[in-house]
Image (tube, rainbow, N blue to C red):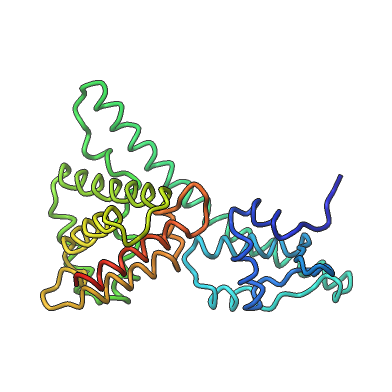
Amino acid sequence: MERDEWSIQEIARLAGTTSRTLRHYDDIGLLPPSRIAPNGYRHYDAQALVRLQRILLLRELGLGLPQIAEVLGPSTSSGTQDATGLAERDRGEASALETHLALLREEQTRLARQIASVESTITALRGGENLMAENMFDGFDHTEYKEEVEDRWGKKAYADSDRWWRGMTDAERADWQQRVSDLGRDWIAAAESGIDPASAEAQDVARRHVEWLTGIPGTPAAVPGGDVKAYVIGLGEMYVADPRFGANYATSSGGTQGAEFVRDALRIYAEANL
């Protein structure tokens, strides 16, 4: 049987988010419920579901909530529009989603290349074959964030890090990527274990994370006299706010809990040691 509305708990489960997040979206006017029941429970109709899908897509593309609100405009209830208005709205939503779909397909292609690259490396390693360096990094584009890095930390920061990356041997790049992978794995394990961000175990991972950051030329953490403390704390906040980076620390329960754990542990470490 077709549904015409869903409870906040159902939507949170289906979308892989939390009721708390949906209530926050309501509080800031980004995603009001289509109906609030007498018991205070929020319910969402099909139009709200489409809007939530677009919100989540834009979050994946790295937009903050204020920017998403500007892109989507005010939420309108289907009960306030006539048939012509509803048809125009639906056409506009479909057109916007087509743009999102094109971007997702580009990302799908990039990820498919990465998967093929890693699978090829695994096959070569297990079979004792020679590694083909030209195939190992297909789909890994270190220039992807060039504009963002230059805007945030300046052109010299990007130039220094780019020179450092290009000067690496294939083995050094592989070691560096393994180090990143190990950090992500250990952060997720720590967050899922339920330990305190201030615990010795969590603080040891935070120490390794800061050591990794200070080894990347061009970042404020690697510049003599740079404000490493502010940089580390700011990065922690960015891990929570930006889904592109928060995804690296996503736990099995979903949401931003993993990124929040990393943020809290890094802040504690920075305030005590930097």
Give x and y (percent) for residue 169: 13, 46
Seen in the picture, residue 161 relative to 119 is either above or below; the reply is below
Seen in the picture, residue 182 relative to 156 is either above or below; the reply is above
The residue depicted at 19 percent of the width and 70 percent of the height is 273
Give x and y (percent) for residue 270: 25, 70
Give x and y (percent) for residue 229: 23, 74
Say which quarter of the image contains residue 102: bottom right
Q: Residue furthest left?
A: 224
Q: How many marks?
A: 0
Say which quarter of the image contains residue 85: bottom right
User: The N terminus lies in which quarter of the figure?
Assistant: top right
Seen in the picture, residue 169 relative to 247 is either above or below; the reply is above
Q: Residue furthest top?
A: 127
Q: Between residues 256 and 63, which one lies in front from this camera angle? A: 256
The residue depicted at 46 percent of the width and 50 percent of the height is 251
The residue depicted at 30 percent of the width and 68 percent of the height is 268
Q: Between residues 93 and 266, which one lies in front from this camera angle? A: 266
194 to the left or right of 124: right
Q: Residue furthest right?
A: 82
User: The C terminus lies in which quarter of the figure?
Assistant: bottom left
Q: Between residues 202 and 166, which one lies in front from this camera angle? A: 202
The residue depicted at 22 percent of the width and 34 percent of the height is 132
163 to the left or right of 110: left
123 to the left or right of 39: left
14 to the left or right of 118: right
Give x and y (percent) for residue 111: 42, 45
